[in-house]
Amino acid sequence: MKTRVAILISGAGSNMAALIDAARRPDSGYEAALVVSNVEGAGGLAIAAAKGVATATVAHKAFGKDREAHERAVDAVLREAAIEVVALAGYMRVLTPWLVGGWRGRMLNIHPSLLPLYPGLDTHARAIRAGDAEAGCTVHLVTEGVDEGPILGQARVPIVEGDTPGALAERVKTAEHELYPRVLRAFCRGLERG
Ligand code: GRF
């Protein structure tokens, strides 16, 4: 049995698309069972639907400032779909300890920097400004601290002369699309072996 994975998105969903496509390979070890967005009409929803993956929207706006109430609604959707592992892919919400605790050891995130460098936003501009020779991306387990959990895998790309945050972001994204499916597959295989 393949591990049932839900992918949580807020936007374009290019990592989501890579995860869905990789899940289709016979040896993937996981199934992209559901895509959930907190943003109505997020670009990734149409892509997921076109690829034949079930989608759901749980708009955070409807819950005002009550983050946990929104998370309880998201969690209900995940449990209803018998999800075993959650992959955050451009899910632009800071999670409360309630959701993190409920999925401890079973929720992954991808971050566009070589953690522990540059948690948070604007990672590419910060790496260029610092004069770094390389940048990259990290897949990690989600814990209470933002972008802080145990690292499961990283990929590196060079920062070139005259780089812009946009150009670097594109280079890193290409690496993300290779890294995330590879790490998720290995992670789900590890779960199978127990
Ligand atoms: C990616 O750069 C990811 O690392 C970050 O958010 C971005 C999402 O992009 N967490 P996409 O929606 O997967 O294209």
Image (tube, rainbow, N blue to C red):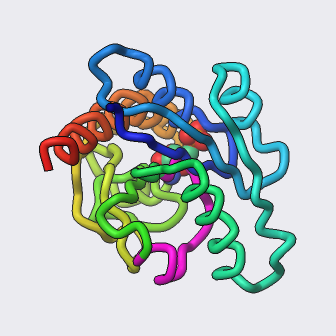
Going by the image, does 121 lie left or right of 84?
Answer: right
State the residue in front, 96 or 123. 96
Quick check: 20 above or below 166? Answer: above
- On the image, the x and y values in percent for residue 4 come to 43, 41
State the residue in front, 4 or 127. 4
- On the image, the x and y values in percent for residue 182 come to 28, 31
Seen at 51% across and 74% down, the residue is 99
Seen at 63% across and 29% down, the residue is 53
Q: Does residue 111 appear in this view?
A: no
Ligand 1 positioned in quadrant: top right
Q: How many marks?
A: 0
Going by the image, does 63 lie left or right of 76?
Answer: right
Going by the image, does 43 lie left or right of 181?
Answer: right
- On the image, the x and y values in percent for residue 127 come to 39, 55
Going by the image, does 115 lie left or right of 171?
Answer: left
- Which quarter of the picture shows residue 100? bottom left
Looking at the rendered image, the quarter that the N terminus falls into is: top left
Quick check: 24 above or below 31? Answer: above
Q: Does residue 13 appear in this view?
A: yes
- Whether residue 95 is in magenta: the answer is yes
Residues rendered magenta in the picture: 88-101
- On the image, the x and y values in percent for residue 42 come to 77, 44
Seen at 83% across and 81% down, the residue is 64
The residue at the far left in this view is 193
State the residue in front, 112 or 107. 107
- Whether residue 40 is in magenta: the answer is no
Seen at 62% across and 61% down, the residue is 92
